[in-house]
Image: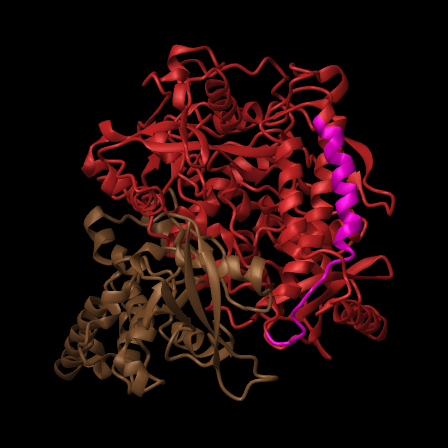
Chain colours: A brown, B red
Amino acid sequence: MSEKTIVITRFDPDRDEKPRKQEYTVPCEPNWKVLDAVNFIKDEIDATVSHRWSCRMAVCGSCGMMVNGQPKLTCKTSLDDYGDHIEIEPLANFPIVRDLVVDLDGFMDKFEAVKPWIIRAKEQAADVEDLNGKGTYSQTTEQLSAFKQFSMCINCMLCYSACPVVANEPEFLGPAAIALGHRYNMDSRDEGKEERNEIFRGEGTVFSCSYANECSEVCPKNVDPAAAVNQAKFEAVIDWAKGLVLPRGGA
Amino acid sequence: MDVSRHDIVIVGGGGAGLRAAIAAAEADPSASIALVSKVYPMRSHTVSAEGGAAAVARDDDSLELHGYDTVKGSDFLGDQDAIQFFVEEAPKELALLENWGCPFSRNEDGTVATRAFGGMTTKRTWYAADKIGFHMLHTLFQHSMRFENIVRYDEFFVSKLLVEDGACRGVAALDIRTGEYSAILGRAVILTTGGGGKIFPFTTNGTIKTGDGMALAYRAGVPLKDMEFVQYHPTGLPGTGILITEATRGEGGYLRNSEGERFLVDYDYGVGTKAELGPRDMISRAIVQEIEAGRGLSGPYGEYVHLDLTHLGEEKINSRLPFVRELAKTYVGVDPVTAPIPIRPVVHYMMGGVDTDMFGATSLPGLYAAGEVACVSINGANRLGSNSLTDCLVFGAAAARKAMDFAKGISEGNEAALRTQVEDEAGRVENLRGRQKGGEKISEIRRELNQVMEDSCGVYREQTSMQAGVIATAQLRGRVADLRLEDRSKVFNTELITALELANMVEVAETLAVSAAHRKESRGAHTCKDFTTRNDQDFLYHTMTYHDPAGPRLGKKDVVLGRWVPEERKY
């Protein structure tokens, strides 16, 4: 066990004009993650600290926070990686609701804007019956691997905290949403690429990206959203160029 | 106070809730579907499921075999009409999930791949590497977004069902962000809130799994069924309880004791040639017995055995079990490519829950339940791995269709009376917020509850400890009414939510302890040291617990038998 000083950003909109810092001394067990220290504070020292968490196994995406200035999934981040003084803040580039809790409204709107579902030209049920007696689409392992990586995003939003474009341009569609749209574009079962590419060619989307690559650096799931943005950019241009030569996107 | 009106109100945004919302939205595009959850849907605990979802897919398989495996796995306590319906619907539901974009792993010919799982005769578990729950949840959530008639209430905590004129007509919900109450009214309500593993100290469950829906229904007079049956998953990481999927064994992993022996092969634990692919209840007991026989290993978080994947090779582990590798490295510092993973049995799933018929209907008109919160029951005394995700889909959809039919034929109810109920509930919770005059704080009571449940209702149970559990949980119910809270803020007051959750946990725990103490036999996951065999003569029935101010009142319900006659359960 070792004692660490944990500094937490506190903010209650009913009382505070702006966020303030509060220090706690926490007896940390070996192998603890950053989240364990925050939970200890909540349970044993100060029950008024508010934060989100659930699965504590790096898959529900709830517990993203800034740890010493870097966006981290706190259930996956070892306390041992830090010294005896750790600053924990709410995720950057999001409005604060309270303490370590940020507002997801804008993120959810962006998420939905890329139409993250399978789009088919025909009604799905009839379509699938045509394809295969078992009611499922055929998809090869190669076709699966074309999008699989981009389907691994847990929506933890660390990439939005790291993205320099989001910081300056809060309306920017952002890494996770673009990666998600691209994920469906690359899925062999999907026929909605044209619709999404039109979205991608709009203002504040793929062409706003400045290639900083910060999103992929902080991603706890190796989704590599920067690669998705780059690929999406390329596809959107190709699609547009085809449209110049052939009517209806070259279909 | 906000009052909103919908046709259907769904409480819980995980696998069952999202599937129900989609089914309802498809059934009537003009209907308004409310989806209310205390977390954003993608945070729901469905996300943590790893191994796969079961449905017949191969030519060497049949619905009959899936049915028989499930009945046998349930130790003959599953209802055979519901199981028949379940296995028939399963392939259709998983095909839909595929159509909606779930990235299932594939065979070389492009068809969906299936893997072996415990207690299943052949390969019928559809998988997406080792993250099926994550992919299923995200696929359903993303697909649900295309329906404009699904109205989400994210981060709203439902603390009361509104019952008026004999029917459930909506919910009282606390908007966590503002601290204000809303009346979310509907002609029918579907509970899809999942289980309550957090009443135990060592569980795979996320912190949100506090039995909320079970407690809501129970307080509204709906019985809970078969609450004594708690599934211990054989392979959780010591310390955290993080799930290591059964797919590790489905892919060929071994369990080994401190001598390096494959004890499921070298000793007789009733699993026969299935060995590591025996059902969860039997394997969890085998591990406990190995440890008690002195063949366990010892670490900072107690005794454990080894899950050995080293012979599978790096390539297979990376392609089939990448998440397991990530979890083992991150949380116990072990790379399963080169070293065995320490594991021990861990509370995973509640077979019991809100009593429903095979289409999700409860005894309260207008109230439905599906997924882990419900007890249909297809799982009986022991659920087979990979049946639960399919269960969420099959019964989520079925409950939604029935609820939509019901909603068409019933009035909206008396809005003024419903409003009053919500105002009363808001007043009750307002008194609780920052209530500094109370006796004990949340973490103290939760710790004690956890200890009581582990001592009384573990893998092996005894009459004396179960009776002690009954008394202790009743006392805790009294003490939880006198909590001391510190946080007086309205905005995102997680202490207040935790207090409401703790009251739910204690209520659920008490029904569990009472049900367990009454069942004087060993069946499935309920293993009594005092009554070591199954007793069909006296206990082939579902245990019912009814809410009563004095404590849970017991009842019985017949098991629906059928073509499969109870026989000795041996593999």
- Residue B358, given in percent of the width and then of the height, sits at 66, 41
Is A246 located above or below residue B495 in the figure? below
**Residue B389 is inside the magenta segment:** no
Indicate yes or no whether the magenta region holds residue B466.
yes
Residue A228 as seen in the image, left or right of residue B286: left
Q: Is residue B211 visible?
A: no
Q: Quadrant of residue A214?
A: bottom left
In the rendered view, would you say B367 is above or below B243? Answer: below
Q: How many numbered markers are drawn?
A: 0
Q: Which image quadrant: the N terminus of chain B?
A: bottom right
- The answer to whether residue B525 of the structure is visible from this angle is yes
**Residue drawn at x 53%, y 55% as measured from the top left:** B14
Foreground: B149 or B153? B153
Rendered residue at 60%/64% (across/down): A47
* Whole-percent x, y for residue B454 in the image: 61, 35
Measured as percent of width and height from the top left, residue B200 is found at: 59, 41
Residue B203 placement (x, y as % from top left): 52, 42
Q: Which residues are magenta?
A: B465-491
Left/right placement of residue A162 relative to residue B2 reads left
Query: Considering depth in this image, is B73 or A87 the residue closer to the camera?
Result: A87
